[in-house]
Amino acid sequence: MANQPFKTEIFKPLTPKREILELTPNNRLAIVLKHILGMSVQEISEVMQISVSSTKEKIYKGREELRKELIKK
């Protein structure tokens, strides 16, 4: 038993992938760009071609949607 490799499959992944897929498309994009790719709000607004304030709103709403999805589980 001392030579058995450590089994990592017993741990859940840190990224709630299934729950992220449940988000509305624009909010999902904003969340992925911000929290997975690490982009700034300014960069996200340029990629999505929306204002900085709209970007902040989508990130906020995406977080709220994600929180609600995670609470369901």
Image (tube, grey):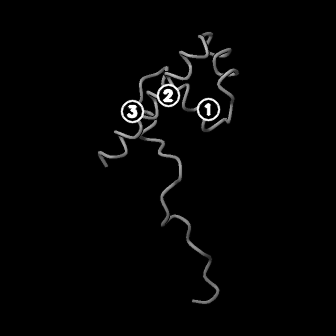
Q: Earlier in the sequence, mark 3 or mark 2?
A: 2
Q: Amino acid at mark 3?
A: Glu
Q: Which mark is residue 28?
A: 2
Name the residue beneath numbered marker 1. 34
Please name the residue shown 64% across and 86% down the image: 3
Q: Is residue 55 above or below residue 11?
A: above
Which is nearer the eye, 22 or 70?
70
> Hey, what amino acid is under mark 2?
Arg
Residue 24 vs 73, above or below: the answer is above
Residue 64, percent across and down? 40, 34
Question: Which label sits in the foreground, 2 or 1?
Answer: 1
Q: Which comes before the other along the chain, label 1 or label 3? A: 1
Q: Residues within 10 Å of mark 2 (few under 14, many from 20)?
A: many
Reply above or below: 44 against 36.
above
Q: Nearer the viewer, residue 66 or 21?
A: 66
Q: Residue at x 52, y 54 (%)?
A: 13
For marks 2 and 1 on the same chain, the one whose residue lies earlier in the sequence: 2
| Residue furthest bottom in the image | 2
